[in-house]
Image (spheres, rainbow, N blue to C red):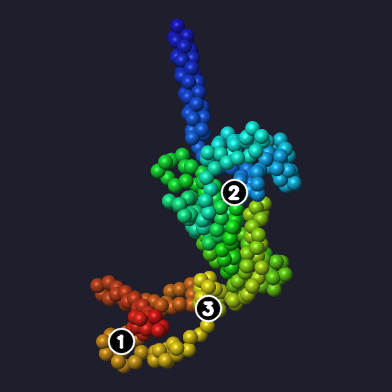
Amino acid sequence: MVKRKRASQATAAQSSSRKVKKSGRDFSRKRSRNEEFFPDSLQRQILCALVDPEGVVSVSDVYEQCRSAGHKKSIVQQKLGELERHKFLVIGSDAEVLEGPLFHVASGSVELHRDGFGFFVHDGEGDWYIRSSDARGILNGDRMVALRIPNSSPDRAPFAVPLVLTQQGSRRIILIVEERKTKLVTRVLADEIKDQVLLAEEVLLTASPGDVIVAELGRFDVQSEAWSATMIQSLGNINDPGIEVSISLHKFGIPGVRDESLDPEVAAIPEMVDEASLSSRVDLRGLPFVTIDGPDAKDFDDAVYVERRDEGYILYVAIADVSHYVKQRSLID
């Protein structure tokens, strides 16, 4: 009797477990219906025909366009069906491809974040969110036509899916050459570009680790997830004096032209601290201060010294007093 009772309990537990599993499957199906639908690359190619079509777009036009790109008709039919089911397009009675209720596009510019995602700034109300997976191949300042994907969370911004790149922003970037596993590669000195940039092999053959190069980006290859680039100019090595200034000038597009009107103010700055400046200060130049900086540091703007006393230690920290020499609203400022 005891064994039969335990078996009965086990059967009930298994039945309960089956109910939980079934409930879990039903719950996951409900969640999947609420998730956003993002058109894939082929479907985006189809939707591009609706952005600025030359005349009426028919199903046969779509088939022909996709066939020339190597896509089978059965696959195109499947993609069209998904787009129609999600209300991005409507296929009319005479086989015309028409805009669906959810086909909402806008023109605007791209603002990328250093973590890979971005925002689509358009003329309408509120920015649209660009997923990191959709930000591949676009850069800050690019203008494009994007498809709006409603967010399943009503309190969050809709998504932007790039369709047509209408105007490229700046393609000038700064690269540094690094050695990895006995091979020279390049790394972008910009937070918003995470993808690899490939320079011509002959450029790397004459380069050295630490070289800083100004390059022009070319095409983004989806398969290799890398940009091609052409070398424009070599700025020198990362350990060269003044290299940070050269990098900043090129990064922000500042003309590197010397302004002769600054010469009188520059000449007025003494190379050593003058007596007038010492009158209101405590002279600690006799202390053996040291700087703690990396091997490639160029800007030694602070130093430290520790003095041991009976009651403990005194820490001296010396910082560069730039404002003493560069006055507010001066030409140098």
Per the image, label 3 sits on a secondary structure element best described as loop
Identified by mark 3, the residue type is Pro
Tell me which numbered mark, 1 or 3, is placed earlier along the sequence.
Answer: 3
Q: Which residue: 48% across, 77% down?
A: 298
Looking at the picture, does residue 20 appear above or below residue 310? above
| Residue named by callout 3 | 255
Measured from the top left, where is residue 2 in percent x and y? 44, 9
Q: How many numbered marks, from 0 up? A: 3
Foreground mark, 2 or 3, reads 2
Measured from the top left, where is residue 219 in percent x and y? 65, 60
Q: Name the one closer to the observer, 201 or 103.
A: 103
| Label 2 – label 3 distance at C-alpha | 39 Å
Measured from the top left, where is residue 107 in percent x and y? 53, 54
Identified by mark 1, the residue type is Asp
Tell me which numbered mark, 2 or 1, is placed earlier along the sequence.
Answer: 2
Q: Which residue: 47% across, 50% down?
A: 128
| Residue named by callout 1 | 283
Q: Name the one closer to the observer, 93 or 140.
A: 93
Identified by mark 2, the residue type is Val
Say the numbered circle drawn on residue 187: none
Measured from the top left, where is residue 11 in percent x and y? 49, 14
